Image: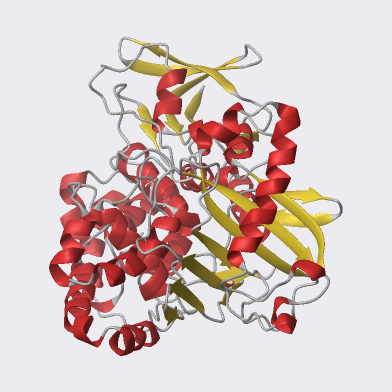
Amino acid sequence: MYDTIIIGAGLSGLAAGIRLAYYERPVCIVEKHTTIGGLNSFYRLRKRDHDVGLHAVTNYAKPGTKTGPLSKLLRQLRLRWEDFDLTPQCGSSVAFPGVTLQFTNEFEVFEQQVAERFPWQIDGFRRLVKQITEHDELNLANRESSAREIVRRAITDPFLVDMLFCPLMFYGSPTAHDMDFTQFVIMFKAIFLEGFARPHEGVRLIMRKVIQQYRKFGGELRLRSGVKHILSNNGKVSGVELESGEVLEARHVVSSAGSAETMRLCDVAPPEQEPYQPGAVSFFETIFSLDCMPSDLGHNETIIFYNDNSRFVYDAPVEPIDLRSGIICSPNNFQYTTPLDEGRVRITALANPDYWMNLPQDEYLAEKDAWTKRIVESSLRFMPDFRSHVIDTDAFTPRTITKFTSHFNGAVYGAPHKIRTGTTHLENLFLCGTDQGFLGIIGSMLSGITIANLHLLR
Amino acid sequence: MNTDQIRQVIMKILSRIAPDNDLSGLKDEVPFREQMELDSMDFLDIVMELRKLYRVQIPEEDYGFLSTMASTVQYLIPKLQTATA
């Protein structure tokens, strides 16, 4: 009999597991896939290592910083600052028709850019920033409210509003067009006020440190162990049945599988009014290996969030891929002391989940290739032409994400409605991860920590 | 355990929870919160560490006793008198 079974060995499940194991609770993480990572995983293809979720770690803080999400989670997981080897970005930008706003990990740079490009909006921008810094995004009692409405009260130029929303939505909005204000605050702080960094080794290093810590404290991990049912009796969970038929008993179950995905595993369905709608926003991502460094071609930016439409549209597109906007990321463009072995460019754009889910296998591969070419062509409006330097290409779609993470629709940011307290219709079944609402590498770990502290360690 | 030993135990726990804080000048009568960056998660950790190390149970309504070093030590004396450092 375990104290807690955790479904999913992604960062949220592992962080919850570390907390429980550290305090000597018998805990077991069950993971369907053959390796850990979930939405922030990694793979090897044709002798090259790739990251899946990670473009950059957000919420950067300098070594020795005592406040903020990064230092909070390091303390909670008993990790040291050096463990994640976070190297700050070189500089990023939001590129719209005729206007580019640059930003770094120093917020003054971004504020100055807004003041120069939108001088008539700067007072409103500063008022908004004040409101954001004063908002306690970790308060689980926050009510949902429209971020666009609140931002429009401070900033009247819809073009600037779109430029602010573009990176925040791309890196963490489960909802189309608008965000919950708390989610907006989380992302604004994570990207603009704190900033980007990356370990030289990528997400593998973070995963390795976290799993080592979990094992050191006595946590148990079972890979290739998908859950068939969450077992319950009179409104209480008693354990899980694995796909193999094996039954594991536990006093609590924490699921990082997603809210709708978790409900599907329950043998007692939730009351119908419960809002367990899966998300529908997903992405197509391309990864290019180059025979040179991106900087050799004059490309020095860490991340470019681009949009060349008059309005920024964030929604599942009607077309297979939305070519009007996207994200260009180069993992080389961080301030490393030694360069990475190989140049890489990753370009990501919004995708139509239904289209990619339903393609027959033979058309699927051809379509992946065709849309990879189109995405590159579209991105060349915002970066130097690197096509003659490509030595290897890979791409993944919403279908790939569902295959490896079991999240419906390949929804990387989960359900539109977040369940911040992590509670469900069963008294000892809890949710953590994307559908609890803290997103990103740092956010997902904080999610696991928060749920463990709130419900399991009291 | 005597008062000094209990104080040492708390110092050890604080250095685990907040390794980046310099604890050498910690004042016993001033709330921890005013001297260190501690939030509610960290206070829960003090309680949890005491339970882990010495099997001391601290009910939630008693968390207020943990605001300063002096009040924490005072509160723990009866609970830790039979424990060995």
Residue A311 or A213: which is nearer the viewer? A311
Residue A215 or A63: which is nearer the viewer? A63
Residue A182 or A401: which is nearer the viewer? A401
Name the residue rendered at 23%, 57% in the picture.
Answer: A147
Residue A319: x %, y % from top left? 51, 42
Whether residue A145 sits left or right of residue A179 in the image: it is left
Which residue in the rendered view is the most extreme toward the front? A310
Residue A59 or A160: which is nearer the viewer? A160
Q: Dividing the image into 4 quarters, which one contains the C terminus of chain A? A: top left
Q: Based on the displayed image, in which of its 4 quarters is residue A219 positioned? A: top right
Which residue in the rendered view is the most extreme toward the right? A47
Task: Say how many tags the image has.
Answer: 0
Name the residue rendered at 65%, 79% in the picture.
Answer: A299
Residue A172 visible in the snapshot: yes
Which residue in the rendered view is the most extreme toward the left? A153
Residue A179: x %, y % from top left? 29, 52
Q: In this view, does A310 lie above or below A123?
A: above
Residue A112: x %, y % from top left? 33, 89
Q: In this view, does A207 lie above or below A14?
A: below
Residue B31 visible in the snapshot: no
Whether residue A157 sits left or right of residue A356 in the image: it is left
Q: Based on the displayed image, in which of its 4 quarters is residue A401 positioned? A: top right
Residue A382: x %, y % from top left? 56, 73
Q: Is residue A87 above or below residue A152?
A: below
Name the residue rendered at 40%, 81% in the picture.
Answer: B22
Q: Based on the displayed image, in which of its 4 quarters is residue A191 positioned? A: bottom left
In the rendered view, how is the structure colored?
Answer: secondary structure
